[in-house]
Amino acid sequence: MDPELIKDCVHCGFCLPTCPTYVLWGEEMDSPRGRIHLMAQHNEGVEMSPEMAGHFDACLGCMACVTACPSGVQYDRLIEHTRPVVEREHTREPRDRAVRALVFALFPYPRRLRLVKPFTRLNRRLAPFLERVHPTLGALAELTPPRSRTRPLPALVRARGRRRARVGLLTGCVQGAFFPDVNRATARVLALEGCDVVIPRGQGCCGALSLHSGYDARRFAKKTIETFEKAGVGTVVVNAAGCGSSMKDYADVLADDPDWRLRASRLKVRDLAEYLVELGPVAERHPLPMTVAYHDACHLAHAQGVRAQPRELLGEIPDLKVREISESAICCGSAGTYNLFQPAPARELGERKAARVEETGADLLVSANPGCTMQITTAMRRLGRPPIPVAHTAQVLDASLRGLGTVR
Amino acid sequence: MTVFDRLEAVFPPDRVITDPVRLRTYECDGLTYHRATPMVVVLPETAEEVAAVVRACAEFGVPFVARGSGTGLSGGALPRSDGVLIVTSRMRRILSVDLDRRQAVVEPGVTNLAITEAVRDRGYYYAPDPSSQQICSIGGNVAENSGGAHCLKYGFTVNHVQALEIVTPDGEIVEISEDDFGYDLLGAFVGSEGTLGIATKITVRLMRAPESVTTLLAAFETIEAGGQAVSSIVGAGILPAAIEMMDALAIEAAEAAVACGYPADAGAVLIVELDGPAPEVESQLAEVIAICVATGSFEQRVAASADERAKIWKGRKSAFAAVGRISPAYIVQDGVVPRTCLGEVLAGIDALQDEFGIRVANVFHAGDGNLHPLVLFDDTAPGEGERAEVVSGRILDLCILHGGSITGEHGVGVDKARYMPRMFTDADLDTMQRVRCAFDPGGRSNPGKVFPTPRLCGEVPRVRKGSPGEIF
């Protein structure tokens, strides 16, 4: 925990109202300012007690505080440096270690995820039982979306009309396994906007889950860089907020190795919305007469600063009304693996978000991160309200570009 | 039986903090210069719980300190290592909004901005707007009688609080209101910095949002020229909602933090906000622009949209914390001078910078002469912190010398208690102490704040020794 980065904090407290755990509990040590204070204590020699570790574990890593901070404190760096220290110095309960091992043996591996998919229907019925075994297993069972048909994506989707660019597409782990339609829509939208879309087979995890949880992400980062280098693309378009934000950090993740750092910095990573706005629209937008609410994924809005672009893209669709969700800066509680390892606060935040989404009266929720989509859908189901359908920005654009008239 | 046993009997374990590592995160508020780890922290959720803590403190003779969001800049919520810290951050319900009577009743932990957010879409707002309004608590605002940029026209917290429910230092819950007959207890309580008790319910005045608001950013080559413009605007009989000034160093910091896009080569910028009926605002704007041009402003920008207005304000409102970008450490000073002396005092601050080799960034509510000099220093350079302290103190001397005050809105707290004798005579201080003792004879409510030498009430006003009741 770099003392220089800690010193940037002037203790003004501007981060407090955007911190989800401070919003829930109103406690100093569960705020960014308080956690930075704990980091400073640890630097002074105070040991990593279970209490201290608990406050770091309770941080969602949503980075809303980074947006709010007027002093430019790099809390994202600070918490990323802190998590491995927690893993090294704090001994978790054996059962907690076991479920962590399970999660990290499953999620970063698309093939394994696809293997467990057939059991998802059973999963939800088993949820109450699994909940008793371990809260993480209960959350896992509850969050899994219903089965969807996976059809393999072609390795190359050619541009429609004049070719304007050639890009790679990251298919992701959870996105690929549970939301294959989002990847298909993304590829179509890019192709319709004049891109050759290269979709390398055998993509692994980008490393986001590990990076945001304090585990070594270098192996994943190197493999992903290699995959896209081999595919011969300089720009990778990412449609999952968490993945995009970690891929943009590759140069830092691989900072120890000059050769890899260079290779990382050569790879241009863009979020889909960010890329489409940079490229500029050419394909015709057909009307979509509906009202949507746009949800800011933390790893898009706070970590990548991508807020205006998705709104701009949605705003260009004729007859489509975009509503804002109040408290949009507050995380929905998904936060990577947070809703698995901290299910209680995650549920509270999920329900809070679901209520705010409901207030908008929209027909459709637009969310550009698979984690948020699962989290908010689950929260709406738990509240027993008629669930609002959720779609990715790519799916809304796809429906407009192809003149479907509605988002399926 | 100890105070711990009593607290643990009243509160569930997750709302009594005794772990030393956790306790230390409460060791300071927005002023990090003074630190003390509290003996115990409690997080009450109701007035009854606050009263129960205060009664426990009375029973065991333990001091207590109230804290809201911990953003104060005078150390008013500095804990006592032998005392209980009562944190109101979980008392954050807006209890009622009555637009017919234009008032809202809120709990002390509600943030200042949350009140406005609750009524904004119905065309109302809560007027006092400290720069920390997004997080500072209304309970803290009551304790400090907080101001903000718009206090020039609309007044301070004391002008916007209509009634309070307070827990007195002996643990009684009482209500005081502006409708009460007799002594103005509400006036005495607001701004008492936690020394008279803890507010647990606050009835605030809601204001109708003005029909029209316009914000002007005017750039000047020198701060003196900007100061001249301020005097001329007020002299012309115009009462803007706010007149704020920032000097070159403060502009540099704000630019680095929030890219507010102020004119880069300005020696000073003035933010003038006018509000009211549209025709009045329009004619005043023309007049203000003419005055700025006449006093040497080389660029004037009028915000064309709410977004542009927000951007202009963002630079100003984040200025304090933004200074963290250009200096490793700094002291936020708060002093007041008569508006007509602005130029002289600023020249005096300039001289201090040269004398001590310490940089000072100036941000201030120019309209009411409330200065916020930011004294910059490097806390790793030996002796620099001490020199900055001296400069900071000398600035207050300058304020007093010119007939001003040692605090405009941040409060005395622990930080400025030592300057109180420079501004007040012993007799003044003794009289204040008697008021305090009337509420808190045991001296348990936020002791060590405001008064330079904490004394027990029994021994306080020295004049009382001879014949109690007769002062002169």
Image (cartoon, coloured by chain):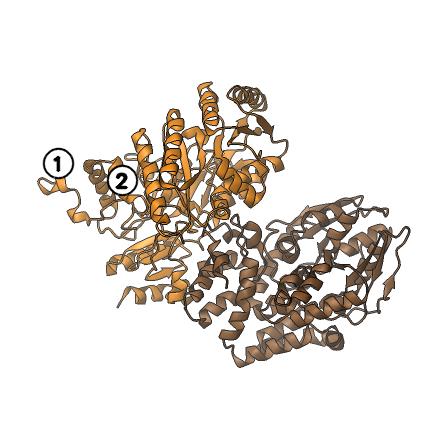
Compared across the picture, whether A173 is left or right of A62 comes to right
A279 and B377: which is toward the camera: B377
Q: Which numbered dot is residue A167? A: none
Tell me which residue sits at (82%, 62%) in the image: A184
Residue A316 figure quarter: top right
Tell me which residue sits at (49%, 31%) in the image: B242
B315 and A372: which is toward the camera: B315
Whether residue A7 is visible here, answered yes or no, is yes
Does B37 appear above or below B414? below
The subunit letter for the residue under badge 1 reads: B
- Hue used for the chain lettered B: orange
Residue at the right extreme of this rendering: A161
Q: Which residue is mark 2?
A: B420
Q: Which numbered dot is residue B470? A: 1
Callout 2 secondary element: helix
Name the image quarter holding the C terminus of chain B: top left
